[in-house]
Image (cartoon, rainbow, N blue to C red):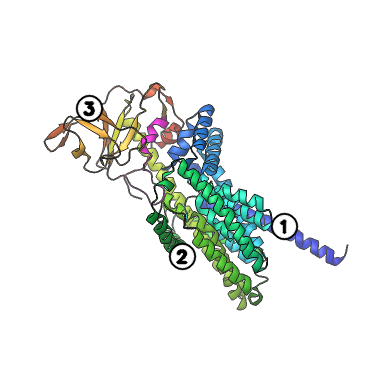
Amino acid sequence: MTTQAIGKSMTLLNNKSLKITTFLTIALITWIAHFWYFNHLGLYEDDYAFIGNILTMDFSRFVDSVKNMNLAFFQGRVVGFNILFFSAYFAGKLGGLPLIYISAYLLALTNNILFYLFLQRLWNQPIFVLTGTLAFTLFPADNTRAFLTHIHILPALTFLLLAFLSYLNDKKFWSYLLITASFLSYETCFLLFITAPFLTKKPQSEIFKELIKHLFILGTIFLVVLILRKLTGDGRVGDLDIATAISTPIRQIITGPFVCLGTFVYRPWQTLHNLRGELLIFVPLSLLMLLWLFLQNSCFSGLDSGENWPIIKQLSLLGISLLFLAYPLTFTVPATLISGRDSRVHAAAVVGASILGGILGYLIVYLANSYRQKNLAALLLATYFSLLIGFGIIVQQQNKLSWKYQQAFWADVIQLAPDLNDGQVILVDAPSLPWGSQLYPFAWSMPSVVGQLYQFPWQWKNVPKLYKLNPDWQLKIAANGEIALNNDNGLLFFYYPWEPARQVKTSEIILLQEKDGKLVRTTTPIVAGAKKFSFKPLTNSTINSFDKGYLYDYLIAPNNKKSVNYFQPF
């Protein structure tokens, strides 16, 4: 073997080893930034409907539920929700909530690796690929990687990236199947695939012909899915008037990209502002890890910006286009929101923003290299991305605290209201229950929780439910002492639209109220103007006669007795 051949073999071996090392580091960064506290996270908001509910089912009920969802073409997202339901059901039955979080981690990591490979196909320049992948992995506008319900969103990105890669490999049939699967997972990623013909290195005349055919196929897919959604009664489509259908995308396109890019500046500042406690450990260690990663990669070679300007301009235009295409189908949430469940509005923007991040990273290194300051560039980039990791830790800490609040609250509810029977209603008058800055601990799903803590008799017509009261609720009690439970009179914070309205006497209702920073059961009469109403007194406990439900050990476990003050804002 010649010296040249040996050198080439060694280079290939080193490159393969470096890629494996890079993938392992990305896997670790994904874990730290989004799933480090996985064993201390729980269910939030929509999770109780989409995760908690199916975990109470046996396999036959689960299969029937999925069949009904598919027949109803649920929200037009049947692929994404099937992935959510099956992964949550089997992971939850095998390893509980922690294993469901691990399944979400594996989905997020798959997307990060696919994006790395996608960037390599666009431009195999190490610094561009590395910084772009880190921007994708630590994308600061969407904070829902570890929100279990959004397991159905992650596959939309998976299928989109696979569709791009298939298209680049000239496997068009597979690319259109994959983008259809993406559309049926979460629709906001669909329009990004319009750009696929521009990724090829064909002459402009051929690209134009290919684009016409491409748009026709995508338009057909879009119309078929739109018609199916409308026929199955999806209000997200059927309830849109023409003015809203036109004005909303325009407004989202104008605000979304700038809000999204703004988070790349705002989130590091948030980390610096909260740099204390565990962040003083995570951020410096992440900085060292990232500095090592940048220095180990050959990302400071091949920086001849003169010959690279054409591809830099092409990729910049691609990134901007993808960023704007991420917002026209975001109808339900304003693009100005950047925290909690609603930050999903930026989910599809991660592709375009990360390509722009890769270009910016390349230009920073090129400029530093021109002044022979490549180590300084590595330090600056490592510092920046370590602060984004720190923000991911902050999000996890907020969600961890939100789960603790729920554990403390529901433990108190069961202690104060152990006398449950068929149709039992529990009302909570607690104005100070906080929202939290990320996933809300006390949201619309509260009525579902009691029914998931215990296995109540199947003969019962109405499983016990807890409702949060709105202010001035006393004024809405009828003179005969009955409370109307519905979604129209403004009495309750939330009443399920699909739940039948009913009248319940106050004497049959358990009332829990906030007093002096604690939750207490009210048995003395409530005076509202000239009226006086009595609520249900404490009777014999019944809860010990019921088998524990799936969530009992997570929410009412003995080690939760040393609880937090869930009235404290956070």
Badge 2 is on which residue? 265
Q: Is residue 97 visible?
A: yes
Provide the major secondary structure of the magenta segment.
loop
Which segment did they paint magenta? 431-453
Quarter of the image where one finds residue 317: bottom right
The amino acid pointed to by label 1 is Lys
Callout 3: SS: helix
Q: Which mark is residue 534?
A: none
Judge left or right: residue 362 versus residue 464.
right
Q: Nearer the viewer, residue 538 or 347?
A: 347
- Across and down, in percent, residue 152 comes to 52, 45
Tags 3 and 1 in contact by the CB under 8 Å rule?
A: no
Judge left or right: residue 53 versus residue 307.
left
Total numbered labels: 3
Q: Nearer the viewer, residue 156 or 229?
A: 229
Q: CA distance from mark 1 to mark 2?
A: 34 Å
